[in-house]
Image: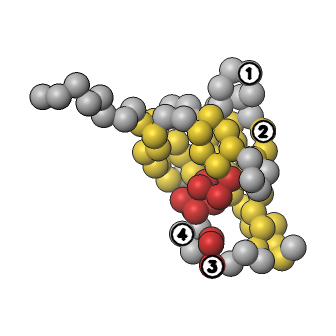
Amino acid sequence: MGNDKPKKTVTIVVEGTEHEWPKGDISYAEVVTLEVPDYAQHPEITYSVRYKRGHGNKPEGTLAPGASVKVKEGMIFNVSETGQS
């Protein structure tokens, strides 16, 4: 056994589905892609991403395109289509 520590993951919930995610940050695009796998092929559709059960200093909020947030065990994300831009 080497001393390569396995990367710690946390379980996050996106629209009711659990996903393992490496500890650290998750971006708007990464959250949307977990829910909408072909997100990248449809740049004209915008999504609203809300989260709750986040870290103490910012337990809930909205994730804007281009932004990211630190993930936490049990964090919940809601992704909803906001239509054409």
Q: Indicate the amino acid at tag 2.
A: Gly
Kindly tell me whether residue 44 is visible in this rendering: yes
Quadrant for the C terminus in the image: bottom right
Look at the picture and state if 81 lies above or below 18.
Answer: below
Q: 10 Å neighbourhood of mark 4: few (<14), some, or many (≥20)?
A: few
The answer to which of marks 4 and 1 sits earlier in the sequence is 4
- Mark toward the start of the polypeptide (1 vs 3): 3
Q: N-terminal of the two: label 2 or label 4?
A: 4
Estimate the spatial distance between the alpha carbons at disc 1 and disc 2, rounded to whole Å: 11 Å
In the image, residue 57 lies at what x, y percent? 74, 21
Q: CA distance from mark 2 to mark 4?
A: 23 Å
Q: How busy is the neighbourhood of tag 2: few (under 14 within 10 Å), some, or many (20 plus)?
A: some
Which amino acid type corresponds to the residue marked 3 in the rendered image?
Gln
- In the rendered structure, which disc, 2 or 3, sits on the residue that comes first in sequence? 3
Residue that lies at the very extreme toward the right in this rendered image: 85
Kindly identify which residue carries mark 3.
Answer: 41
Q: Which residue is mark 4?
A: 37
Residue underneath mark 1: 57
Which of 46 and 2 lies nearest the eye of the viewer?
2
Left or right: 60, with 71 as reference point: right
> Is 59 above or below relative to 44?
above
Relative to 68, residue 34 above or below: below
Which kind of residue does numbered mark 4 sit on? Answer: Pro
The residues bearing labels 2 and 3 have C-alpha atoms spaced at a distance of 26 Å
Mark 2 element type? strand
Quickly name the residue at label 2.
61
Which tag is nearer the camera, tag 4 or tag 3? 3
- Asked if the residue under mark 3 is in contact with the one under mark 4, i.e. CB atoms within 8 Å, the reply is no
Residue shown at 54% from the left, 59% from the top: 34
Residue lying farthest left?
A: 1
